[in-house]
Amino acid sequence: MEEGESTVINNLIENIITDLRDGNLGGLTEIDLLDYCEIDAMGGVTIRDWRTLDFGNDNVFDVSLTLHSVREDEEANFIDITTFEEDEYHRNYLTIDEICYTVSFDYKNRGGVGLEMAVPLAQKEKFKDYLLGGLIAQISVNADSALNAGESWNPDDYACNNAVRAFLYYQKNDAILFPVTHPEYPNSIYGSGLESVAGPTILKGEISWDGKANMIYDDLGTGNLANSFEEIVKNSTQTWKVFFEEIQSSANSGEIIVGVKKEPDHGHVVVFMPESLYNGTNEAIIIGEERGVIKPIALEAGNDVKEIKPFIGEENDITRTTNQYRYYKYK
């Protein structure tokens, strides 16, 4: 059912779920809501539908779907399918009158939620695996490619900056973490090769020369990249356990969170990963007097071993009062 002036194609929910799933598996980053409806309202139209759908292999879901404020403007209706938000609250649709799992995706070129779907809590895990498994799989593929880039750059030593910016580029098609052109040697490609030092893909971004972790730390800290990154600050009443749980939860949802520190010689930068991509044991640690802290899972390329593992930050790196790790979310 629709509100306002709109025409919806048949099998709306089924088509959107299929395209989300196939898009993530295929490495796409967006879908266009105008592929599923025709709108005659610049101010925006809200579209709602609900169905019981059977995708085979016991993937049967009672789905409620809402498209929020779909506009006639062709550029306003692209949905970013690389990240999502999760919630649980009461729904009443079909024969459902209970707490439901909700997953939502934001508009890419304007603020706010564009696409929202819900299923009963009993269907949550199977629905997440069916709908979002492709997203996690694509993150895994891009993480492997980023680690390979770091390995190609410097197999025996640190290549964290190269791996982190490669991951952001692969995942979001954004080269912002690559260094600017060398001010004195404009033909230099140092730090700009994607697959290796010499390319073949050469990218220029917005990090001050020479693009290493210390420069990333400085440019993020001074606000030079504020249009693309916002700092995540642990408040004075928050425990490290809760703070790291929130970072891990964001990474599990496809959000890109980086952690970066500065050192006299060279610093370090990581990007956090969904915890499902790590198969080892993530043992609790002690930070100060706080026990039971679980460090988030990160893509680490700071030494000869480049892999996905628990965040390598040591207690004195994490808690020191100057040049400690700082955390930023990609917008």
Image (spheres, rainbow, N blue to C red):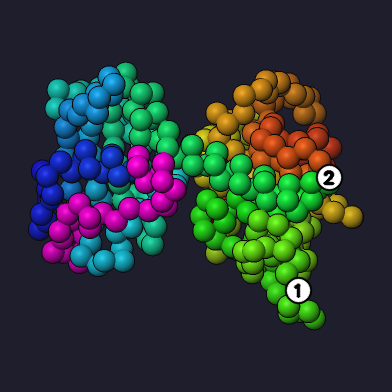
Q: Indicate whether residue 247 is drawn in magenta.
A: no
Residue drawn at 57 percent across, 56 percent down: 169
User: What is the x, y in percent for residue 270?
Assistant: 69, 45
Query: Please, what secondary structure does the residue beneath circle 2 have?
Result: loop
Q: What's the magenta region?
A: 21-46
Query: Please, what secondary structure does the residue beneath circle 1 have?
Result: loop
Q: Looking at the picture, does residue 230 appear above or below residue 96? A: below
Q: Residues within 10 Å of mark 1 (few under 14, many from 20)?
A: few
Residue drawn at 67 percent across, 20 percent down: 281
Residue drawn at 78 percent across, 79 percent down: 185
User: What is the x, y in percent for residue 284?
Assistant: 71, 21
Q: CA distance from mark 1 to mark 2?
A: 23 Å
Hey, what amino acid is under mark 2? Asp
Q: Looking at the picture, does residue 201 appear above or below residue 106? A: below
* Closer-to-camera residue (57/160): 57
Residue drawn at 18 percent across, 48 percent down: 47
Hey, what amino acid is under mark 1? Ser
Residue wearing tag 1: 188
Location of residue 13 (image quadrant): top left
The reply to whether residue 304 is visible in this rendering is yes
Q: Which mark is residue 107?
A: none
Q: Residues within 10 Å of mark 2 (few under 14, many from 20)?
A: few
Report the side of 34 relative to 76 (left or right): left
The reply to whether residue 246 is visible in this rendering is no
Pointer 1 or 2: first along the chain = 2
Q: Which mark is residue 156?
A: 2
Report the side of 20 relative to 267 (left or right): left
Report the side of 234 relative to 127 (left or right): right
Location of residue 41 (image quadrant): bottom left
